[in-house]
Image: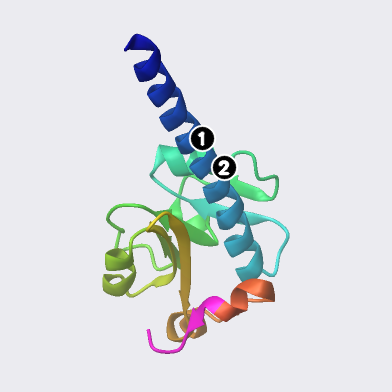
C-alpha cells in the first residue's frame, strides 16, 4: 500500500513539473510572437509565474507595472496598470478590458487565444504560428 501511494505521489509530481515546463515554453512563444524586441519586461505579482519565466533568457521581471511591456496575472488585475495583460483563466480574459491574451488548460490541453480588438488598442500584432489564435470576435 505504501509503495502504491509513493508511486501515485511521484506520478503527480512528474505531471506538475511537466505542466510547468510546458507553461514556460508556451508563455515564451506568446511573448515572442507579440514583442518586437528580443528582450521583454514583464510584471507579475504571482511568484509561480516569475519562477516559470526565470529560465527564459530574454524575459526580465520588473518591480513596477509602469516599467513593463506585459503584465502576467493569474488572479485579479490592478486597474491602474494600463499595460497589455496575459491572463490565465477564460473568465478573467472576458472581464478584463486590457487582457490581450489568455492561456489556460482545458481538458488537459493548453488553450491560447488573443483578442484582435485589444491587440489593436495597444498597437500589437501577433506574428508567426500563434497568429492563428487571434480571435476577431473578442
**Disc ID at residue 125:** none
Query: Can residue 124 be seen at all in this image of the molecule?
Result: no
Could you tell whether 45 is left or right of 31 in the image? Answer: left
Kindly state the secondary structure of the residue where label 1 is placed: helix
The residue lying at 48 percent from left, 84 percent from top is 116
Q: Nearer the viewer, residue 5 or 26?
A: 5
Looking at the image, which residue sits at the far right?
38
Q: How many marks?
A: 2
- Give percent across and percent down for residue 28: 61, 55
User: Residue 37 occupies which quadrant of the picture?
Assistant: bottom right
**Disc ID at residue 17:** 1
Kindly state the secondary structure of the residue where label 2 is placed: helix
Establish if 131 lies above or below 32: below
Looking at the image, which residue sits at the far top?
2
The residue lying at 48 percent from left, 67 percent from top is 112
Q: Nearer the viewer, residue 59 or 21?
A: 21
User: Is residue 42 inside the magenta stretch?
Assistant: no
- Give percent across and percent down for residue 137: 39, 89
Callout 1 touching callout 2 (CB < 8 Å): yes
User: Is residue 134 inside the magenta stretch?
Assistant: yes
Split into 4 quadrants, where in the image is the N terminus?
Answer: top left
Establish if 89 lies above or below 22: below
The residue lying at 34 percent from left, 10 percent from top is 2
**How far is the residue under mark 1 from the one under mark 2?**
6 Å
Q: Which residues are magenta?
A: 133-138
- Give percent across and percent down for residue 122: 50, 78
Query: Can residue 128 be seen at all in this image of the molecule?
Result: yes
Q: Nearer the viewer, residue 67 or 40?
A: 40
The residue lying at 33 percent from left, 75 percent from top is 97
Question: Neighbour class for label 1 at 10 Å: few (<14), some, many (≥20)?
Answer: few
Q: Nearer the viewer, residue 22 or 63?
A: 22
In the picture of the structure, the residue carrying the numbered disc 2 is 21
Amino acid at each position: 500500500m505504501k509503495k502504491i501511494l509513493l508511486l501515485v505521489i511521484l506520478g503527480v509530481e512528474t505531471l506538475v513539473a511537466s505542466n510547468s515546463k510546458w507553461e514556460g515554453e508556451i508563455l515564451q512563444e506568446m511573448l515572442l510572437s507579440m514583442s518586437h524586441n528580443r528582450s521583454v519586461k514583464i510584471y507579475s505579482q504571482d511568484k509561480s509565474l516569475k519562477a516559470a519565466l526565470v529560465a527564459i533568457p530574454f524575459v526580465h521581471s520588473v518591480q513596477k507595472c509602469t516599467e513593463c511591456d506585459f503584465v502576467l496575472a493569474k488572479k485579479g488585475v490592478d486597474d491602474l496598470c494600463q499595460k497589455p495583460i496575459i491572463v490565465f483563466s477564460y473568465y478573467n480574459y472576458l472581464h478584463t478590458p486590457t487582457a490581450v491574451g489568455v492561456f489556460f488548460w482545458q481538458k488537459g490541453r493548453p488553450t491560447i487565444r488573443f483578442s484582435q480588438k485589444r491587440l489593436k488598442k495597444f498597437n500589437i500584432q501577433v506574428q508567426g504560428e500563434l497568429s492563428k489564435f487571434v480571435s476577431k470576435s473578442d
